[in-house]
Image: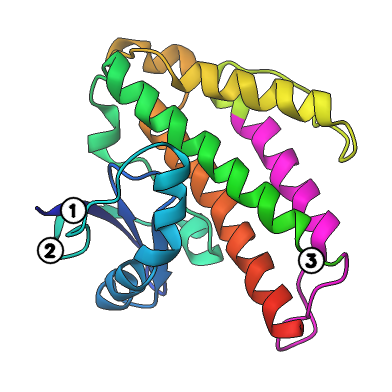
Amino acid sequence: MTTAVYLEVGQRRVFASALEWPGWTRAGKTEDAALQALAGNRERYAPVVREAGLAVPEDLIDDFAVVERVPGSASTEFGVLGEIANADRKPLSGAQAGRLAALVSASWKILDRVIAGSPAELRKGPRGGGRDRDKMVRHVIEAEASYGRQLGVRHPPPDLDDAEAIAALRADLVAAIDQPWDVVELAATGWPPRYAARRIAWHVLDHAWEMEDRRERGS
């Protein structure tokens, strides 16, 4: 089995993303470094797959196949996954959409568990930077409200303590992803569902893992 990967290639940063596994994305200074980071992240991503009710293939990282390279942008250099692969523009069946939606939902469950086990104040970065827990969670939620507009989902950013509003936003995001899609719909929606699923899950997991690392190293 090979795992299809696409690379978003900037001048100083490269993102490697597993096309069929939204959220399994890592970055490095070079293509090789990004692919190594992606391979090294397999065990950390595996709980997301299991949470989605899917089996983790034993040979998931035995062979990465780079199927596409897309030029990066200023977002890439800043550290934000931001470019849509051509593979993301392919039509999406109902079964494929349901699988993507399950993985996105699983990423939120992983984040919720990390939040529940994290202190309000997290270990600072090497230069004293980095958001504490609640600011990081607020940032994730506000980003999701912004992402929603690319899928025709319009919610004001929920307050951090408004669990009902957060759940409603996320339910509508999942509903927008969890349906068959044809390329002719792109002009109306903004983001292809495959890319939306990857961008949402990557952002959630990237911050969940950051929170986890800063929690553990600070304990």
Q: Position of residue 39 (x, y in %)?
A: 30, 69
Amino acid type, mark 1: Thr
Relative to 213, residue 16 above or below: above
Closer to the camera in the image, 11 or 20: 20
Q: Nearer the viewer, mark 2 or mark 3?
A: 2
For residue 93, side relative to residue 200 (left or right):
left
The percent coordinates of residue 198 (x first, y second) are 43, 42
Could you classify mark 3 by the number of other residues whose Cα lies within 10 Å: few (under 14), some (14-19), or many (20 or more)?
some
Q: Secondary structure at mark 2?
A: loop
Task: Tell me the tag on residue 63.
Answer: 2
* Residue 82 appears in the figure: no
Please state which of residues 141 and 60 is positioned toward the viewer in this rendering.
Answer: 60
Secondary structure state at the residue bearing disc 1: strand
Q: Few, some or many C-alpha atoms within 10 Å of disc 1 (few <14, some 14-19, many ≥20)?
A: some
Three-letter code, disc 2:
Asp
Left or right side of 208 for 62? left
Residue extent of the magenta highlight: 120-147
**Which residue in the structure is indicated by mark 3?**
131
Q: State which tag comes first along the sequence, 2 or 3.
A: 2
Q: Are marks 1 and 2 in contact (CB under 8 Å)?
A: yes
Where is residue 25? Give x, y as percent. 40, 57
Location of mark 1 (residue): 3
The crowd level at tag 2 (other Cα within 10 Å; few <14, some 14-19, many 20+) is few
Q: CA distance from mark 1 to mark 3?
A: 33 Å
